[in-house]
Amino acid sequence: MSFAETSRRDFLKGSGVLVVSFTLAPLVASCARGSAATRTLAPDQVDAFLAIDARGGVTVFSGKVDLGTGVRTAITQIAADELDVPLELVTVIEGDTALTPNQGVTSGSLSIEKGGMQIRQAAATARRALVQQAAQRLGVPAGDLVVENGTVRSRSGGKQVTYGELLRGRTFSLKIDFQAPLKDPASYTIVGRSVARLDIPAKVTGRFTFMQNVRVPGMLHGRVVRPPAIGAALQSVDEASVKSVPGLVKVVRLGNFLGVVAETEWGAITAARQLRATWSPWAGLPDESRLWRHVRDTAVVKNDVTSNVGDVEQALPRAARRLAATYDFAMHTHGSIGPSCAIAEIKDGSLTCWSASQATHDLRRQLATMLAMPERDVRVIYVEGAGCYGRNGHEDAAADAALLARAVRRPVRVQWMRADEHGWDPKGPPTLIDLQAGFDEIGRVLAWSSQFFVPQGGTGDVELLAVGLANLPGKTGLNPGGILNDMAIPYGFANVRTVAHRLATTPLRPSWIRSPGRLQNTFANESFMDELASAVQMDPVAFRLRYLDDPRGAEVLRRLVRLAGWGGRDSGQRETGGDVATGRGVSYVKYELYRTYVGAVATVEVNRKTGVLRATHFAIVHDCGQVINPDGVRNQIEGNVVQTVSRTLKEQVTFDRSRVTSLDWASYPILTFAEIPTVDIELVDRPTDKPWGAGEPAAAVVPAAIANAVFDAIGVRLRSVPFTPAKVLAAIQAGP
Amino acid sequence: MATAIALDVNGRSVTVTVDDPQMPLLYALRNDLGLHGPTFGCGLAQCGACTVHLDGKAVRSCVMPLAAVGTQKVVTLEGLGTPERPHPVQQAFIDEQAVQCGYCINGMIMQAAAFLVTSKDPSEADVKQALAGNLCRCGTHLRIVRAVMRVAHRG
């Protein structure tokens, strides 16, 4: 084994500080213009993920990024523990296309499960190599060496050498070896601990560098002017209407893409508001009041059978008793508190873009395509923004900034206004689900059949807004994300068929929101499970356990019974004597049928007179295997519950025939402090298992738990998210 | 037609030169003074991310015209405390790990700090009421309430 002489410091020899008031670790600043080309980004190489400097400082290069979920802290823990170095010596660089390997989109609760485990294996490979090197250097068998705080020393004491001394700033030049032994989980001292998040002190004191805070020398401010109707064509622009705006640099028009650039941010905002333009009329959206009819009538391009067991078509007609229900889940926005933001600079034929994108490597390719530039001339640097919870508008803002920067030949910062974010970020598509099931003569489930009406497309690029508006290269089909997940069910019924009707179109540009598909599909599946349990007068937990051939899943449900004090159906009912009834409901998911298990019991209060529904309490049992940071996981579970209660009770994108009309927090309300439930959490501790994700799964169980609790409380089914007071009242009126 | 406007920000006298005195205070703080505690969330006074103190009162800086600030003392998150010497509310947010993405947290801390000056023994319901106009999307509410209660009832 040898260490190559290419110094890691070569690529760190930057051209000094590029970004003014940029307070990330100094390493990042000096990397910003480094000769990054000397680094390998090949994901099979240790060097792609790890560098150790002469003083023993460890730099982790992570393609997965922290979207505000605490992943940076967890990855620091993983690397520090596997290398046996103190946490303080580890720095993580995230999502810089010139410095970090492409580990795929930061989505799907995969940052630890996939990204973190690549880094762990790279660290294990590095550690083994360093110990071997130390064995040679010290003349001690590797088996007699131990590592503590980045120092390899003989077990018997005496001889020792540090990582820094072994490497002397050189690279590893090693392939990641998947046979390199990981540490015994029992010996982890940093993994499994609730290490305080590294970003919080800076975030609570105004020192943290959000994307929205980055400033580049010579930078101008841009704002986009969106059409008043989604498909409207720009007919004319009256540039005289903004002549009086101080510091206006340029009105940029490219087809239907319209933007302004000014010396100051307020100048850009003023110009964007003041600019007069005429647009053609367009009214191509469906009638909102007939949305579900529209979805059902949309052309189907193909059917994806997502599971098929036995013979449903033959079994269902034979059933002694059949049940059917239709569920729908409204279009939702991501709802980031900070609107999307990016900076682009084109200099000497190269584009540098600072973005809070969850997929900087993909964005790099998209920007290169749009601008017809070679990919090697585009660099995207991740800087954390407000939480995005999926593919929101960050990538679109990056494209906006790139077009404006190209037009004015100066760096341009674009931050979307609130109406841009609410109106133009891609949406979680409307989801319509028909469910059917049949029982045999003794009340056992004989068949389960489901049909989902969801847009076509997968997890590929979401088309950049600017590409469509300016008619530039880079058009893509629909890509709503992995929305077929969890259409199939975790229950062992004899006959199961689940089918996705893939629709040719969907009203608004779709993308993935948090727990995409899993959220909507689990809502329908777990609500319908409750309907089935009720039909055969079984306790819904016992009913699930009857069909669950999965010890880990069963354990989650049994622990849930204890945690929630679940005493069977009706155990949560409490008549207050007034208009308010309370109830409890259960829900369960095995995420994508192969990983994280979550069970939930929701407690609700329903006001029969006003229709106001409150979710007051959640009990959650969560098994995501090895837990890297217990408090981090709890923080994610709490967040999943609160955000999804908001989605379930309040949220829907509204629109007229031309555009989105829910353009602010008044027209798209989210949960407020007075409405939050309390949350009890039990983490199933499995330190010797592999770690799975926690950023999404707990979201999936929330809507059905609430719906089932409402049934427990007042005996009516809510099958349409959001559960607004009007829908609750209508359901009460319609009766059970 | 640039106008010079004198401000008292975090205990310092500063002057910002702007084209439009109606420009909201937020832009002067962020762009002219480099103070990034207050963030732009909505520009509509709906979410609270931009909250600062004016003479001790929590105010939405995204709709506060610069010309209307006058001699009122402006305090931002940076003026409240530092990582080395955090304000008790900032320390409580660290202790409770009451942050996810943290974009709204400026507003939560500034709103809570102003509230706690006048409300000495608040109930949990009082705290939720005080924060009723502050939005958080990550769902950090439970921890935020715990953090504020921790300050309110310390000692």
Image (cartoon, coloured by chain):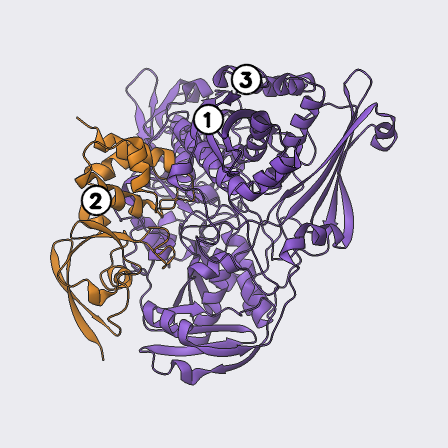
Q: Which residue is mark 2?
A: B114
Amino acid type of the residue tagged 2 in the rendering: Ala
Left or right of A386 on screen, residue A57: left
Q: Which residue is mark 3?
A: A571
Residue shown at the point (51%, 44%) measured from the top left: A650
Front in this rendered view, residue A432 or A160: A432
Q: Secondary structure at mark 1?
A: loop
Q: What crowding class fits label 1: few (fewer than 14 Cα within 10 Å), some (14-19), or many (20 or more)?
A: many
In front: label 1 or label 2: 2
Which chain is purple in the picture?
Answer: A
Amino acid type of the residue tagged 3 in the rendering: Ser
Q: Are marks 1 and 2 on the same chain?
A: no
Q: Residue A627, labelled with which disc? A: 1
> Callout 1: residue from which chain?
A
Q: CA distance from mark 3 to mark 2?
A: 43 Å
Which chain is orange in the picture?
Answer: B
Amino acid type of the residue tagged 1 in the rendering: Val
**Location of residue A97 with respect to B70 vertically, above or below:** above
Left or right of A108 on screen, residue A145: left
> Callout 3: residue from which chain?
A
Residue B30 at x, y = what percent? 27, 59
Residue A122 at x, y = what percent? 48, 36
